[in-house]
Amino acid sequence: MKSSNVYFYMSRIVLDELVRNYEKIMKGEIDKLEKIVYDSKHYNFNLSSKVFIDAKVSVDGLKRFYQNLYNEGVLEILYHEDSMMSEIVRRAVNRTKPFSDNKNELKDALTWLVYSKFVEDYELDSCYLMTDNVSDFCDADKLKKGDLEIHIELLSDTKRFKVCRSFKEFVQKEEQAIGELSGNFKRWLDYQDFDNIFILKMIKASLGDEIKNEIKNKFTYYDLNYLFNLDYDAKGFIAFSETFYMSNLIDLNINVLDEECIISGSLNISCDVEGYGYSADSDIENEYALIGEKELNMKIGFSFSYDMNEKPYNFSVDSIEVLKN
């Protein structure tokens, strides 16, 4: 990492293992929950509905989290090269670090080669290897004294790494450098004019499609009877026009953090919608008929992050309120 900026890198191997371990944890917790639900029947508990947690949805959410970090330029994913395998075999045979006599750390060896090659190829300075597996990567004698220094056998690959066990430890060691970055951000922030006009223009230019998708997802299972003031029970769906009108930005709030700010507020949105109800009398299977159309007026609560790159990210629709006409 260069001293003027902080970048984060993760090998694809580590990311894949993280996802796999998360899947195992999810499965274990779901099994526990299902046992609790099953055992509750012995105590005459009446559950209104079956407790259901979709592990795949949770895992997909974790994958999206890291994909978003990558898309936003916060995290870079590093891939290993096939040519590294011959070096892995040599180290495994000779028990060269991070291999040892008692363990077969294929994953760690491949991850180390990915990282060391990357920092050498790009001649990076002030790099940290963040790992709690210090026994395989650090000098054993110095480790006994509490010093985290790369093992001498690994220094032939690169001398560019320091070691820290956690993100908290990294922040403590680099507090001054991070403070300088924070100072730069605050000085940049002094020249920004975050008024309603600027924020609304930014939302329309950069977040329009995300807002549309959030609204459409919200109304996937919405009550047609309430929305169209029906006097009968209708089951069906809502179709949206492609044009959404955004106006009247209110309750704007700017929460300033170390290297970013969180912008939140409420926004009025209107669009034309049509309601389609299931026609049980139709000879055609899954036939839906138009039951109403109207202009739908809403107030949405939103938030997103903003930094010196001047592009909004981590956008979220926090609430959607239907306004009665």
Image: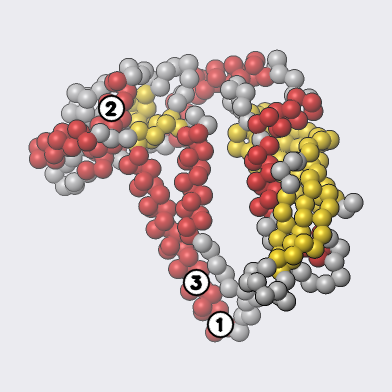
Q: Classify mark 3: helix, strand or loop.
A: helix
**Do the residues under discs 2 and 1 have CB atoms within 8 angstroms?**
no
Badge 3 crowding class, 10 Å Cα cut-off, few under 14, some 14 to 19, many 20 or more, is some
Q: Position of residue 111 (x, y in %)?
A: 28, 36
Q: For residue 34, which numbered disc appears in the image?
A: 3
Residue type of the residue flagged with mark 1: Lys
Query: CA gap, disc 2 to disc 3?
Result: 45 Å
Residue 108 visible? yes
Left or right of 48 in this view: 129: left
The residue at the far front in this view is 283
Q: Is residue 140 visible?
A: no
Percent of width and height locating residue 231: 86, 70
Q: Write down the residue under mark 2.
A: 116
Q: Amino acid at mark 2?
A: Ser
State the quadrant of the N terminus: top left
For label 2, the crowd category at 10 Å Cα-Cα, with few meaning under 14, some 14 to 19 and many 20 or more, is: some
Q: Which residue is mark 1?
A: 41
- Tell me the colour scheme of the image: secondary structure
Name the residue type under label 3: Glu
Question: Percent x, y for residue 213?
Answer: 65, 46
Q: CA distance from mark 1 to mark 3?
A: 12 Å
Q: Pinpoint residue 319: horizontal percent, then vertical percent.
A: 73, 48
Per the image, label 1 sits on a secondary structure element best described as helix
In depth, the one of 221 and 60 nearer the eye is: 221
